Structure formats: C-alpha cells, structure tokens
Amino acid sequence: MADLLSAALIERGERALVAHRRTPPLAGRWTLPATAVGEHETAEEAVRRHAREQFGLLPASETFVDTLYVVDPADQRQYVANIFRTALEGPIRFNAEGDYDDARWLGPAEIEQLDTMPPDLRLQLVKLLTDPESAQPMDWERFADDVSAQQAVPLAEQQAAEPAEPTPPPDNKAAWDAIAKAYQEERFGDRFGERLMWSWRASEDDLHVLDDVRGMRALVLGCGGGQDVVALVKLGAVATGVDISPAQLAYARKYAAARGAENASFVEGDVQDLSRFDDESFDLAISIHALGHVENVAAVMAEAARVLKPGGVLAVAVQHPFDACVDGPPYRVTTPYWTRERDWTWEFKDGSAGSFRAYRRTVGEWFELLTNAGFAVERVVEPQEGDIPKAPDDDHDDNRLRLMPYTLIIKARKR
C-alpha cells in the first residue's frame, strides 16, 4: 500500500522552490517540499505544517494541482504525492537543520538537469512551470526581494533576529461550538454504546482504571457530548459534566435523556474555574481527552483538588506526548517532544470547521502538575490498542497503535 505525501509547489515567477532531501523518503534526491500526511491531519494541513517547520512560511492558501505516484529507489517504497500550488505569506527562513540540506529557486531548464529528481515529478514540474493553462498568477510582492532559500541560515537564528508578530490563539470554545453537530454525528455519537472509553478503543472494561463508582458523586471535566457522564451513571455514579461549549452540552442533554441517565446533569463552565461547586463535594473527577485544549492546567488541578473529598480520585486521559510528535507513515519523529503548542483546523463533511490550539505537556510535567496540586499518583497507563478490535468506521492506523501508545492515562488520589 502506497504512503501519502503532500507536496508544495511554491513559485516565484517562472521558478519553483525545490529542495534536496536529507531524510527519507527520497533521501539524497531533489524534490518539491514534501511531507508524509499525519494520521490526524488533512493533506492541506500537512502542507501548511511542513512549510512552517522547514521554511518558516505561513501558507495563505493551497490549491490542488495533481497526483503523482513516486517510488523511492532506496527501498522501493511507493508514495502517492498530492501536489498543492501554495500561496505564502512572509519571507522564507530556510531551516538548515531540518529535512533538507539545500533549497533553490530553479526554472524549467535547470529542473530538467536534475537527474536525481524522480522522473515523473521532474516532467510534471517542468510542465506546470511552462504551460500557461496550468500556471496560476501568484502575488510575489509578499516576498522580500533580498530573501533567498539558498541562504541556509538556521531558523532559530533568524527568528531571534526577526521576532515574529504574535498571533492570537484560536478560540477553542468557538471551534467546538462550530463543529459540535458534525463531530458527534461523524466521529463520536453513540458508537461506543454506554461504555466508559479512555481512548478510541480502550475502555474501562479493558483497563480497570477506576474503583467501584457505585453511589459516588462524579465530575467530568470537559464532558463534550456527555458520553462519559452517561457511562459513569450506568456504572452507578451520580455524575455532572462541565464543558465550555453550549452546542456540545445541548447534544449531551439529549444524549443522556435518550438513554435514561436520570442521575446525569450538565453545567456550562470553564474547567479552570469550578467555583460553582462546594469544597469536598465530589468523590471522583475524570477528564478524557479534554485537558489538552486547556492552557492553564495547573488551575484545573487546583480546582479539582478543592472540590474532591480527601481520598478522592482524579483520572486524566490525554493524547500521549510521544504520539503527538510522530508523523507518518513512514513513522518518524518530526516535532520535538517538548513542543508546547499546536494549532490546527478540523474540517467535516457537512462543511463545518473549527480552528483549535492544543497545549502539549510531557509525562513528567503531568506528574508534577498532579503532585503539586496535592495528589498522589497511583497508576500510569499507556494502553496498547493496536490489537483491540475496532469499530467499522475507526480510521486509526493499527500499525501506528502497535508502535506507540495513543493515550496517556494517569490515576491520582487526593492526599
């Protein structure tokens, strides 16, 4: 099965930006800037990410041009490369420590002399640069005249010399409101029945993270569509869900009512501020794949410690920080483990979309956040999900899940 690549056709007049790869795929060959499409990103998102990481560029738009089939002579691995004509904003800052050891603006005649460029790519690239019908005018006034990609200055040095203007973070609340209906109908909904799911495949039935919850007062931090609240009710708890998104909560209330979860309630609010709840009023708090969207997790931990009774349990599940820094296939670490933030746009079939910011933390940071708030960590769970049976519409890659954990789960108890 061929792997999927996204390639950027970046033009300046009748020249295109081509780069000499240092790393697989196609190591030692001239190509368009290209990257493997990650499991949880679109082809367009991959182009934007790669342009930012390797050339310090912010794509303004991407237009699909063509699809090529490329074979890497080194290992005969097959790739499907989708080419996007990419309009960009800002000067190029070539990352000399990245995937390429050289990058140049070349015209058709020069590209024809690149023997190490895959032949199909070389022919198509020359055609795109010379055929008036396939070429689209670009606004190159955005580029500084004296900037050249051949000047291999490390990105970190240029950013230090030319501090970028800060950009406001995406509005996570507005994004969840925008995609709530499509997310629940296309991705989540009732696909798991009434099980408490710690990840897309691993359930409480599999992992046994919690104690017996019968009769407990439970709080779900970032409850989304209410599935975790209903699951706790079915396990015998009296559960309350908190979420910032009114649209998600509207779905959650309907979801709970349809399943007869009478001991479920929902509150609109920010999990960083639980002041509406009394001290020591809950026995249990959980948060499943929600705290990665919260900037001030220390405040969440402090509030959870306040509302939990002594001996109460806080169980948190987040995307595993190792999974967050791997792209592929082919699988490789492309983002530093200590990267703090990631912005992306989630698009759905009905046309709805939302732009999000995720806040990344290492395993050590999660441990310190919990212990600093007065919790004692009892278990750290990294489920191996590659061999767990999946639902028919589960698009998560079994091979990836066999290589690394997708989810990090930490169970802690208030001291």
Image (spheres, rainbow, N blue to C red):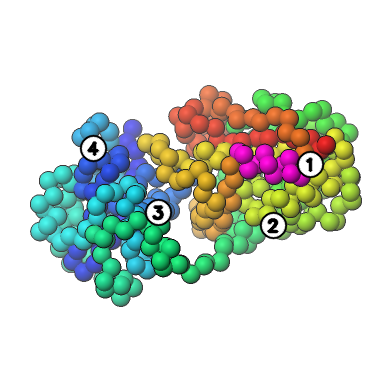
Q: Earlier in the sequence, mark 1 or mark 2?
A: 2
In this rendering, the answer to whether 279 lies above or below 393 is below
Q: Earlier in the sequence, mark 2 or mark 4?
A: 4
In this rendering, the answer to whether 32 lies above or below 403 is below
Q: Which residue is mark 2?
A: 245
Q: Which residue is mark 3?
A: 53
User: Which residue type does callout 4 highlight?
Assistant: Val
Count neighbours of disc 1 (C-alpha within 10 A) and say few if under 14, some if 14 to 19, many if 20 or more.
some
Quote the CA–CA distance across marks 4 and 3: 25 Å
Q: Residue 344 in the image: x percent, y percent?
A: 50, 55
Q: Which residue is mark 4?
A: 71
Q: Is residue 365 magenta?
A: yes
Q: Earlier in the sequence, mark 3 or mark 1?
A: 3
- In this image, 42 relative to 182: left or right? left
Q: Which residue is mark 1?
A: 374
Single out the mark in the foreground, 4 or 1: 1
Residue found 41% across the figure and 68% down from its top: 162
> Which element is circle 1 on?
loop
The N terminus lies in quadrant: top left
Quote the CA–CA distance across marks 4 and 1: 55 Å
Q: Is residue 362 magenta?
A: no
> Which range of residues does the magenta coloring cover?
363-374
Say which quarter of the image contains residue 144.
bottom left
Specify the farthest residue to the bottom: 141
Residue found 18% across the figure and 46% down from its top: 117
The C terminus lies in quadrant: top right
Single out the mark in the foreground, 1 or 2: 1
Quote the CA–CA distance across marks 2 and 4: 46 Å
User: Which residue type does callout 3 highlight?
Assistant: Glu
